[in-house]
Image: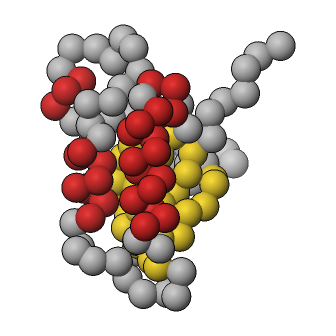
Amino acid sequence: MTAAKPREFFIQGITSNGRQFRPSDWAERLAGALSSFRPKGSGIGAHIGYSPLCVPRVIEGVKCVIVNEALRDVEPMAWEFVMSFARDNDLQVAEACLLPDPPLASVAMPVKKTANG
């Protein structure tokens, strides 16, 4: 039996009363603060970017931070920090997952008709 994939939580830059959260770079700041928390074997140069367990995104015009539940296993205090941040700032949190982009639809090229058909 395979282990279940860790869940992802979307911390949205919208408060429970619908107001946009400020400052405007909050998502980048939060993800930056957690950039050193990574799964083992992240590879060379991994320290240069965001942790794959906590990444900022803009989804349908709303700034978000996507937090992978695996962060809890890597560093429980970091998990508590990010979830407390959402709670303390009254931000909306949704459990969801990012879906991969659909494959590009194959483009049918018109067939050139010949004199024979």
Asked if residue 30 can be seen in this view, the reply is: yes
Specify whether 50 is left or right of 52: left
Specify whether 20 is left or right of 49: right
Residue 26 image position (x, y, % from top left)? 26, 64
Residue 67 image position (x, y, % from top left)? 47, 46
Residue furthest right in the image? 1
Q: Residue at x 39, y 39 (%)?
A: 78
Q: Quadrant of residue 45?
A: top left
Q: Quadrant of residue 33?
A: top left
Q: Residue at x 19, y 27 (%)?
A: 47
Specify whether 55 is left or right of 110: left
Q: Residue at x 47, y 33 (%)?
A: 76
**Above or below for 20 versus 83:** below
Q: Quadrant of residue 25?
A: bottom left
Image coloring type: secondary structure
Specify whether 22 is left or right of 94: left
Residue 109 image position (x, y, % from top left)? 54, 50
Residue nearest the viewer, comparing 40 with 83: 83
Asked if residue 99 can be seen in this view, the reply is: no
